[in-house]
Amino acid sequence: MTDETPYIVPKEPGRWRALTFAALMHALLFAFLWIGVRWQNDTPATIEAEVWSPETREAAPLPVPQKEPEPQPVVKETPKPKVIEEAPAPKPDIALEQEKKRKAQEEKKRHEEELRKEKEKKRLEEEKERLAKLKEQEETKRLDKEKAEKAKKEAAEKKRKQEEADAKLLAKARDEEMRRITGGVTGSGGTGEQAKSQGGRADAGYMQKIAARIKSHTVFNVPVDLVGNPPVEFVVELLPDGTLRGAPRKLKSSNVPGFDEAVLRAIDKSQPFPRDDKTGSVPSKITISHRPKDQ
């Protein structure tokens, strides 16, 4: 080798093999970095590779793989215990006011309870009075009913006695009438009416006058279908002035109630009865006989 000949670096054996190996390592490194970025969000550490001079026969050292950061455990926070705040102690003035309110409420309740008891007592008394009045009214009604029944019985007894007395009087009057008839003391006319005097003698003319007087005051429409001509007889007691001593007593009914009532009204309208012209007095008792179809 001379100074004129340029220096040429001799080719080292295995050059292409080293380049291929280096390219392969770079590809692996790139793939490792790509996968690491995908696995975690941390910025991967920068790896630098130096290429030595071709004189270096040794290959570049392999990169040391970095360990993935270990996930740190999640520490759960322990809940803090609740602190119960105690109510502040009431002040003396507030406590006194609350005590007054409590006493006032108790007093109000006691007063309301007393009013309720008084109302209940008053209600019971009123109910008792009402029941007593009701009982008294029922007792009064019972007594009145007993009195009414007693009065009814007395009236029935009185009526029975009166009927018995009337029957006796009728029997006696008939006996007297029979005695008068047999003695010839009668008064009669041809009109179908008959007036008979008792307690004194009277002629036939006076009796006919009395019968005509009663007949003139008798107002009655005789039924068309009346069977027979039944008479009605009344005993009439007179005072000295010719007025009725009492209500006329029916001795015999005509069985026609309307006609009996008409004759009774006629007797009442005929008073005062006149005096007998011959004796100058009014008979004390007369018997009136009147027939419906003889009007």
Image: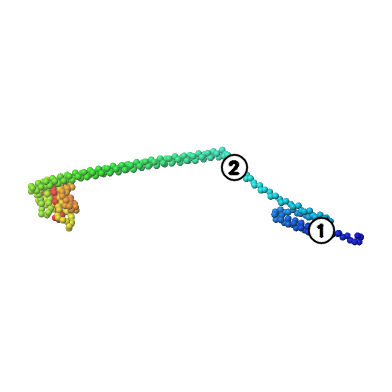
Callout 2 secondary element: loop
Q: Nearer the viewer, mark 2 or mark 1?
A: 1
Q: Quadrant of the C terminus?
A: bottom left
Callout 1 secondary element: loop
Rendered residue at 70%/56% (across/down): 38
Nearer to the camera, 64 or 240: 64
**For residue 212, which numbered disc appears in the image?**
none
Rendered residue at 8%/48% (across/down): 182
Scheme by which the image is coloured: rainbow
Q: Position of residue 278 (x, y in %)?
A: 9, 48
Q: Which residue is mark 2?
A: 84
The part of the image, by quadrant, that contains residue 190 is bottom left
Q: Position of residue 291 (x, y in %)?
A: 14, 53
Left or right placement of residue 262 versus residue 279 in this view: right
Nearer to the camera, 71 or 203: 71
The part of the image, by quadrant, that contains residue 127 is top left
Q: Which residue is mark 1?
A: 14
Q: Position of residue 217 (x, y in %)?
A: 16, 53
Rendered residue at 53%/40% (across/down): 98
Residue 266, placed above or below residue 97: below
Q: Is residue 239 visible?
A: no
Q: Is residue 110 visible?
A: yes
> Badge 1: how crowded within 10 Å, few (<14), some, or many (20+)?
few
Q: How many dots with numbers?
A: 2
Among numbered discs 2 and 1, the one appearing first in the sequence: 1
Q: Name which residue type carries label 1.
A: Gly
Q: Name which residue type carries label 2.
A: Ile
Q: Quadrant of the N terminus?
A: bottom right
